[in-house]
């Protein structure tokens, strides 16, 4: 059987994403986020997206600031050391343009694990006694989104049950599966048929990719399948789970990519400082997204010198030349 | 006679150095520690180079017992993985946490109440329309609820030390049992999952601990140069100061040398 060629352009890949889709991502806070795709989503003016993420970060802030997002389900949004909160999310929450559903980190990873293994929920004991479990703070419920009309939104935020097997005391919380339409991943290598290899920490990539119906993979390098299959234990995702493959070096900038480049902290801090207001965000987006026609053009604007400083040392897997401290 | 292990004098160290040292002294050798970004990284690394060389650290992005050559800037940083025992992902490390392998957690918070309930989610207004929306929980409540001991590191301000926090992101010694919302002890809410809870709050002014019976916070030590009255003026509830043991022990010259020249020579968290 002839294999379908999964290689496509960033523009084509973003056309696979529909307005209103539930979306998740690879990475962790400011690491290995698919920024090249995120910028193109802003250019193509995606609307009413429902982000569901173990944790969010700079990529989420860009999409939210641009008005692409209606719902954010997550445990966290910010920029680590380079911006202490998600200022765009905070602003749009206050204006009523964005709903934020709070879960904890464990709740979210269990939700994705359930989605990845095809069960409707999983149990956990994390975060008992917190307002995350307060039924009055069920945001999607309060806004009438748990009525079953969207099959991807569970009818309840949590369920409390007693342990039926060992008779242990105390509540077991059941968290509903995450069932996103699309996972957008940025990884180091992908085979030309779609086999994914991740270097360094895998964060929640496997669960996020397996929970989604459609998988878009952007890689620093597309490599021959026959080469990536020489060491299958190093691979994370089989080719048949992947729908689209794009090669885009530096495609996670300004977030970091283990073994390839550092987080561009200065760039993220500048984004954070400039996008506290909507006017500020709009000006930033005009400069860095709308006035550049492609990610390559964005990289030219960043400049060789800066990218070269961020480039990882091949032994340490991070840059030893970037200035990080005060 | 002064030597490398003598306490440094006021003016010879920065507040953040005192906090890192106070944090490091909470760690016992051989413990498994789950820590977040920033000060906790300084504290754990310092402990590994002084009294607790066999302490292991788990960072929530997925690295176990890394021995960084350069201080990581966040838990997702490639630096966390340098000489790590295992590097994997969230499902693995949070599973281990829930399984019960973690002795000690280091966490932060924006607000705290007398029972050690911490808020990192939203302040002011109501939850749906907050005056200030923060990052959200991250792993804070998971780590705090599943480790044996938790140490919080925070800024000391009256508006942060409140009778009741605006949103309980991370559980203290008296919590609400959901879905009903009745106040109960942590032990009652957690049942068989109870392992312990917050044992210390290290702030910019003092170190606080919690009464084993009532779960209420009390003043343990004040930092050099800070008075008990200063602390009381920066706490928004009636604070038990009767058990104050005196001053927080300052850093030694050796600890300062390690922090400045070995652990954070780039000034990532210590500044210049």
Image (spheres, rainbow, N blue to C red):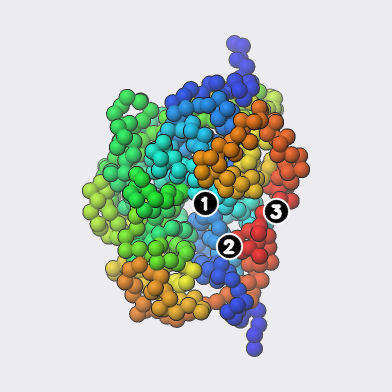
Q: Which of B176 and A268 is in front in this view?
A: A268
Name the secondary structure under disc 1: loop
Badge 3 density bin: few <14, some 14–19, many ≥20, Cα 10 Å: few
Which residue lies at the image location 51% right of the left edge and 79% below the top edge? Answer: B225
Spot occupied by residue B125 in the image (x, y as percentages of width and height): 34, 51
| Left or right of residue A230, residue A76 in this image | left
Residue B263 in view of the camera: no
* Furthest residue toward bottom: B1
Disc 1 packing (10 Å; few <14; some 14–19; many ≥20) = some
CA gap, disc 3 and disc 1: 20 Å
Element type at marker 3?
A: loop
Viewer-nearest residue: B82 or A289: A289
Q: Mark 1 lies on which chain?
A: A
Would you name the residue on which mark 1 appears? A84
Q: Which mark is residue B42?
A: 2
Q: Nearer the viewer, mark 3 or mark 2?
A: 3
- Residue placed under numbered mark 3 in the picture: A323
The residue carrying pointer 2 sits among few (fewer than 14), some (14 to 19) or many (20 or more) residues within 10 Å by Cα, namely: many
Q: Are marks 3 and 1 on the same chain?
A: yes
């Amino acid at each position: 059987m002839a294999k379908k060629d999964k290689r496509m352009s960033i523009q084509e890949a973003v056309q696979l994403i529909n307005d209103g889709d539930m979306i998740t991502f690879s990475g962790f806070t400011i690491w290995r986020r698919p920024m090249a795709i995120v910028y193109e989503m802003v250019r193509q003016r995606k609307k009413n997206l429902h982000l569901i993420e173990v944790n969010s970060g700079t990529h989420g802030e860009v999409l939210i600031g641009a008005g692409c997002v209606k719902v954010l389900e997550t445990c966290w949004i910010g920029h680590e050391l380079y911006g202490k909160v998600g200022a765009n999310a905070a602003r749009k929450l206050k204006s009523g343009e964005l709903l934020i559903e709070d879960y904890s980190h464990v709740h979210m990873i269990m939700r994705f694990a359930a989605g990845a293994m095809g069960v409707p929920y999983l149990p956990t004991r994390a975060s008992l006694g917190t307002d995350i479990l307060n039924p009055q703070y069920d945001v999607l419920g309060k806004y009438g989104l748990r009525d079953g009309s969207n099959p991807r939104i569970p009818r309840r935020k949590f369920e409390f049950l007693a342990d039926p097997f060992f008779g242990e005391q105390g509540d077991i919380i059941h968290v509903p599966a995450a069932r996103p339409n699309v996972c957008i991943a940025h990884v180091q290598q992908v085979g030309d048929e779609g086999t994914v290899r991740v270097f360094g920490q895998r964060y929640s990539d496997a669960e996020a990719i397996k929970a989604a119906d459609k998988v878009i993979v952007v890689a620093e390098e597309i490599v021959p399948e026959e080469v990536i299959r020489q060491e299958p234990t190093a691979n994370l995702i089989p080719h048949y789970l992947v729908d689209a493959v794009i090669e885009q070096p530096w495609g996670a900038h300004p977030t970091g990519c283990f073994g390839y480049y550092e987080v561009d902290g200065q760039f993220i801090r500048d984004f954070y400082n400039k996008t506290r207001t909507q006017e500020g965000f709009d000006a930033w987006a005009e400069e860095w997204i709308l006035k550049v026609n492609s990610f390559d053009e964005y990289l030219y604007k960043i400049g060789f010198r800066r990218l070269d400083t961020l480039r990882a040392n091949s032994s340490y897997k991070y840059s030893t030349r970037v200035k990080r401290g005060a | 006679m002064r030597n490398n292990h003598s306490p440094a004098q006021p003016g010879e160290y920065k507040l953040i150095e005192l906090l890192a040292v106070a944090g490091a002294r909470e760690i016992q050798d051989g413990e498994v520690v789950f820590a977040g970004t920033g000060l906790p990284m300084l504290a754990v690394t310092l402990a590994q180079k002084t009294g607790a060389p066999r302490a292991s650290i788990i960072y929530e992005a997925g690295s176990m017992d890394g021995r960084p050559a350069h201080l990581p800037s966040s838990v997702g940083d490639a630096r966390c993985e340098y000489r790590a025992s295992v590097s994997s992902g969230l499902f693995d490390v949070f599973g281990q946490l829930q399984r019960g392998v973690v002795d000690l957690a280091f966490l932060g918070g924006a607000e705290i109440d007398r029972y050690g309930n911490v808020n990192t989610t939203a302040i002011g207004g109501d939850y749906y329309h907050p005056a200030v929306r923060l990052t959200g929980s991250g792993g804070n409540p998971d780590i705090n609820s599943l480790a044996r001991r938790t140490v919080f590191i925070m800024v000391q301000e009256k508006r942060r030390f409140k009778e009741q926090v605006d949103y309980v992101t991370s559980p203290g010694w008296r919590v609400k049992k959901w879905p009903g919302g009745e106040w109960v002890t942590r032990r009652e809410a957690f049942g068989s999952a109870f392992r312990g809870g917050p044992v210390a709050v290290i702030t910019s002014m003092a170190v606080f601990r919690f009464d084993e019976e009532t779960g209420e916070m009390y003043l343990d030590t004040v930092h050099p140069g800070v008075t008990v009255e200063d602390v009381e003026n920066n706490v928004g509830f009636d604070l038990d100061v009767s058990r104050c043991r005196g001053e927080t022990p300052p850093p030694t010259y050796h600890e300062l040398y390690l922090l400045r020249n070995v652990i954070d020579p780039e000034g990532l968290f210590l500044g210049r």
